[in-house]
Amino acid sequence: MKNNKLLLNARRLIFRNATLIFIVALAIFVFIKMPLFFTKTSLLNLCSQASVFGIVAIGLTMIILMGHIDISTGAQVYLCGVIGVRMFYATQSLAAAITVSILVGMLVGTINGYLIGKVGIPDMVLTMSTQFICRGIGNLIIGVDAVINVSDPVFQSIGQGKTLSVPNCTWFFILVFFLGWILLKKTKFGRYIYAIGNDADALNAAGVNVLAVKMGAYIITGFLCGLAGLINVSRLGGSTFGLAVGMEFTCIAACVAGGASLYGGVGKMPGTLLGIVVIASVNQLLRLFNVSNFLYDLVWGIVVLLTVSMDVLKHHQIKYEKDNGYLYPGSGKSIVLLTNMFGLSK
């Protein structure tokens, strides 16, 4: 009996703090094998690379919390970036490029949210279609040259410029993160998102416009995809065919690694931030260790599989504990679990 209780508490501790445990283990490994990772230049590069998919992951967290998914976010980033570059070429106005890029992302988000929330098209099927449509339109806009470059210093300042020695794109991410955290934690909209993930029918019966909340989450994500798309092409100095392919899965992995459950209703913005750090660090390490480009897809496939599998195991663990009368602790209860594991509690 005592061994069973010890095993249960160990499982609870591991599943609840899997991301934090992984970060500590990864930091120790990197400190021993690759101390270059902790240099100022390397860390600033890490922040710059993480900012683009990190911004998208903030919006995707809201969608996942509702129990939905969006696998078109990478294609939206691609399309919005291409349109932003073309608009800048046409008008020589950075404001016009930003506005149009964001509006296009919001339009895609509106369509996704309405067709999923009102029409009832399965989110996976719909966003897969949206993914192909966005990429197709983006390819048509780029044209036969397959590459569009922007060398204007004003345009490049968004993604390549620095303020207080920190990349501007990182400041954008920090702002988006805090706004997303406040939205989820301090507003009715955030509480409704969690409620939809737990029981959308009950929320609808209470008189809440569930469709409006769902559309709001998808529109916000589209807005962030538009912003990320412009930052991405500014940081890279242009766009090419196939840009941002697979970014949606990187974002999903970051959300799930940070504790957001694909079953909905579970997750927090600080957790997503940790997940973003983990995924960005893995990507940076692959580059520092000179891992072949041919192995990138294999590695990321394994990363996504592991994060999703961890979420499934965690979901089953919670269900098991509820069925057997155990109370599943919230975050911040690790010390209690440790004392229980070693028989130190009263």
Image: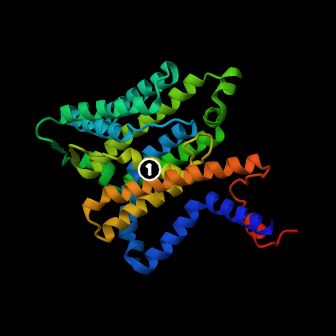
Q: Examine the rendering and report whether any part of residue 229 can be seen.
A: yes
Tell me the crowding category of disc 1: few under 14, some 14 to 19, or many 20 or more residues within 10 angstroms, Cα based: many
Residue 113's x, y, as percent? 47, 27
Total marks in image: 1
Q: Quadrant of residue 65?
A: top right
In depth, the one of 185 and 308 nearer the eye is: 308
Residue 328's x, y, as percent? 73, 52
Residue 116's x, y, as percent? 48, 25
- The structure residue drawn at horizontal position 59% and vertical position 53%, both measured from the top left corner, is 313
Task: Please state, as top left, top right, bottom left or bottom right, where the C terminus lies in the image.
Answer: bottom right
240 above or below 98? below
- The structure residue drawn at horizontal position 34% and vertical position 36%, both measured from the top left corner, is 76
In depth, the one of 277 and 81 nearer the eye is: 277
The amino acid marked with disc number 1 is: Gly
In depth, the one of 339 and 225 nearer the eye is: 339
In this figure, which residue is indicated by the disc labeled 1? 54
Q: Examine the rendering and report whether any part of residue 92 can be seen.
A: no
Q: Quadrant of residue 165?
A: bottom left
Q: In this view, does 214 lie to the left or right of 12?
A: left
- The structure residue drawn at horizontal position 56% and vertical position 23%, both measured from the top left corner, is 211
Secondary element under disc 1, as helix, strand or loop, is helix
Task: Please state, as top left, top right, bottom left or bottom right, where the N terminus lies in the image.
Answer: bottom right
